Image (cartoon, helix red, strand yellow):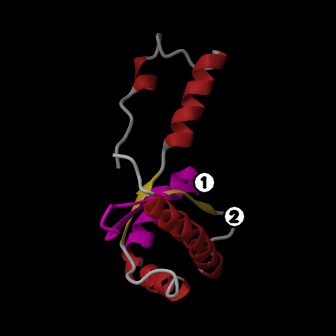
Amino acid sequence: MEETQRQKKIGGLLQQDLAEVLQKAATDGGLRGMIISVSKVSVTTDLSVAKVYLSIFPNKEAAELLKGIRSNTPLIRHELAQRTRHQLRRMPNLEFFIDDSLEYIDGIEKSLKGEENPIKDQDLLGKRKKS
């Protein structure tokens, strides 16, 4: 189903504010050298749930950081509500997921360049993870 204009606007607003909140939390928490970007925010039609897709670099620490972000969801939601109190009446519930599309694209590029041959090594074409 196609997203409505309102869903897109709210998703864009949440994406911008979430990126600022998460980067500030990362630098205040002592996570130097870690980059957290919000790649996409999709909001349900009733505006009650926002699915947030995060790209985290370096990737090896992404699962641990996502676990920490999920445990601090109420604090993040409160901070977002403070920032968007004049634009949104109710803050949607936040669900965080890791966006693995960059890894997937990188694997395809390596295959196309001939660095990795998926025909010889079938493990390279494992099923894409769903979050």
- Tell me the quarter of the picture where residue 66 sits: bottom left
Secondary structure of residue under mark 2? loop
Nearer to me, 70 or 31: 70
Total labels: the figure holds 2
Could you tell me residue 103's position as x and y percent?
54, 39
Check the image and report above or below for 119 versus 59: above
Could you tell me residue 93's position as x and y percent?
34, 73
Q: Is residue 42 visible?
A: yes
**Residue stretch in magenta:** 41-70
Could you tell me residue 82's position as x and y percent?
51, 89
Q: Is 6 within the magenta?
A: no
Q: Amino acid at mark 2?
A: Gly
Q: Is 67 within the magenta?
A: yes
Labelled disc at residue 33: 2
Q: Is residue 52 visible?
A: no
Which residue in the protein does label 1 denote? 58
Secondary structure of residue under mark 1? loop
